[in-house]
Image (cartoon, coloured by chain):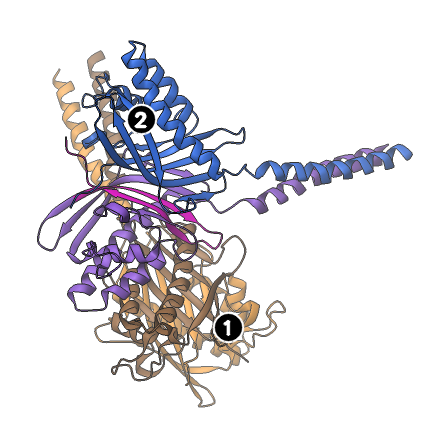
Chain colours: A purple, B blue, C brown, D orange
């Protein structure tokens, strides 16, 4: 009977630890607040970099394309992007082409896009809403965050827009934008 | 010893089936296109319902509160809501109070909210972007969808706004809004 | 005397809390394991992106320049970079120009650089050493991590190199490479 | 009441000076170029010392152990060490044992280590890259430096290797190695 009890206990141990193992294999890597903050900052840096390349006479269209590939999820998944100044049939950009056109312009398929990054901007700062990042909501491998971006143009002009970004973290550690809504503040 | 063997076998059975059960519990129910479409329609219906109650002299503030509880995830999780006509410090509404105030007005904490639902509206139609619902992106138990809502006021006026909704489906089958961005179309 | 005691206690409270505030203002944001993993992954993605642009006939030199600006700290601080295949006087690359030349080639100042990214590579995977990321050492706003990167060329060839990366996190959330050592494995 | 005022003043004095003290304690002592140069020189001297002890029939294994304790941060923190001639699973040495084995050999856990210091070497000189120590990057209490070490063996042979060292300075003034990468120059 002693042996019986031992085996019973062993089985219980195996049961709980075995199950835990199975369960953990299914858990996706969770995105963190820090990763969201970093992705926000990188988006701001990228916008300015495109403008720098433009001013320096570089191939800013190509640079934009590559940066969009790195920061947005177009090449690996799907993205909803509503740029600040897009409108009509081209309000939402579900394709990478539409995103590149918005930032870099010069795309005959998107004739209204002047190239948002080309103003150019010399500063862009993300301001999250609330305290303690309460406007960043984590959902396992996804995150949604809201706030404002304050842009400063090379011409000294300043613009503030409202932003909502959604991010997805992949098993390989990649964090990319799956949602980007930008709009001009409503003025009553 | 016979008893011992029986228990051993029983434990093994429990082990494998138990683990499978645990694992399956981790798989969250996936949200479907149909559920997103339903949630969009329900949001439109709810807006009109609030207006109906208002016109009929009912307790529209109470109704709004209940409807927000039903359709949004404020009571169970967290929500990012940027209403069309909100601005300044009150642009983003992370609390249910802020959402109710926007639709029903009369909240001293949100003095600029006139009560969006009280115009009232007699029709509201969600128009998804793209073909084959390509603007609705499913991510397991989450979904993000983009489009326009066309409102028709009791006064005959028509307004179109840009919408992005994010939804979360719970294990119990509930589908609620975790993200709602609304903005007036940009006019160049 | 009672008042005296009260003031004494108050001062002590102010003393400790006041000091704590002063102290906390000095703390820099700490880099996390997740941020290191993400930076590793992004480096791999960037290498492949440069090759993609090259194959597609795009301005890969410009893209490389912008990507180096985003991922390395050349524009904001200082970087030590020892590429795998660099040698002689040009073994270490302290300037951004030297880094761009290594990845994209075609720089008369770095005549031995063929453009490492142009092979091109179709896969690059970072393998950290040890268990539980024991090869990633965090030092507040800095981190050092060691491992191997396994490259797969478009020609099917496979190469593994030894990597040490150092990262710096800035107050604004930026995480950029300050150290990058790459070397071919020693073969006895 | 006079006593009260005196104590009040005293507390204020303590408050401001106390806070300043606390704050200054948080500022870690900055490492200097001179300390990095000294650490480089000491590493070279230590290598030769181990060889001297070996040739003289002394307990070189014990000496190596002590020197590693003095110069590297294994006992106090963590170290990434990639020796020149290490390979395979033992490429990176995160433990002190692995470092000692590399320099002194004779460790069954590291069967491929012949004892790098035992050749022996009669001269070792660190050559920093760039002018004005531009290859030594200081980050408060941390520093990273790159260069070459030129070894001369007792047999007259000469070897040059590429080095990157990372150092950490402790509050007590200690400066120890937290990173050491060594590799044979690439030969095209």
| Pointer 1 local density, CA inside 10 Å: few below 14, some 14–19, many at least 20 | many
Residue D31 is situated, as x and y percent measured from the top left of the image, at 28, 60
Q: Quadrant of residue B65?
A: top left
Tell which of A151 and C83 is nearer to you: A151
Extreme-front residue of the structure: B156
Looking at the rendered structure, the number of numbered marks drawn on it comes to 2
Image position of D47 with respect to B116: above or below? below
Residue B168 is situated, as x and y percent measured from the top left of the image, at 45, 34
* Quadrant location, the C terminus of chain A: top left
Q: Which residue is mark 2?
A: B123
Chain letter, disc 1 residue: D
Q: Quadrant of residue A19?
A: top right
Tag on residue D120?
Answer: none
Q: Which one is closest to the eye, mark 2 or mark 1?
A: 2
Q: Which residue is mark 1?
A: D103
Q: Is residue D15 left or right of residue B49?
A: left
Residue C161 is situated, as x and y percent measured from the top left of the image, at 47, 71
Q: Kindly state the secondary structure of the residue where label 1 is placed.
A: helix
Marks 2 and 1 in Cβ contact (< 8 Å): no
Please say whether residue A167 is one of the residues in the magenta stretch. Answer: yes
Image position of A86 with respect to B15: above or below? below
Extreme-top residue of the structure: B57
Q: Kindly state the secondary structure of the residue where label 2 is placed.
A: strand
Range of residues picked out in magenta? A160-188
Tell which of C17 and A115 is nearer to you: A115
Residue A166 is situated, as x and y percent measured from the top left of the image, at 36, 44
Give the Cα distance between marks 2 and 1: 81 Å
Tell which of D181 and D59 is nearer to you: D181
Residue C145 visible, this orientation = yes
């Amino acid at each position: 009977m002693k042996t019986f009890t031992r085996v019973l206990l062993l089985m219980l141990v195996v049961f709980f630890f075995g199950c835990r193992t199975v369960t953990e294999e299914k858990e996706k890597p969770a995105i963190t607040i820090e990763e969201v903050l970093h992705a926000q900052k990188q988006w701001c840096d990228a916008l300015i970099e495109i403008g720098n390349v433009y001013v320096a006479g570089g191939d800013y269209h190509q640079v934009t394309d590559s940066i969009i590939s790195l920061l947005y999820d177009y090449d690996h998944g799907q993205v909803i992007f509503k740029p600040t100044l897009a409108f009509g049939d081209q309000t939402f950009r579900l394709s990478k082409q539409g995103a590149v056109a918005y930032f870099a312009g010069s795309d005959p398929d998107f004739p209204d896009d002047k190239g948002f990054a080309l103003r150019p901007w010399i500063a862009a700062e993300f301001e999250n809403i609330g305290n303690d990042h309460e406007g960043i909501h984590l959902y396992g491998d996804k995150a949604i965050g809201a706030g404002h971006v304050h842009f400063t143009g090379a011409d000294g002009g300043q613009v503030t827009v409202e932003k909502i970004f959604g991010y997805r973290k992949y098993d390989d550690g990649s964090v990319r934008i799956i949602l980007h809504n930008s709009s001009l503040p409503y003025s009553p």
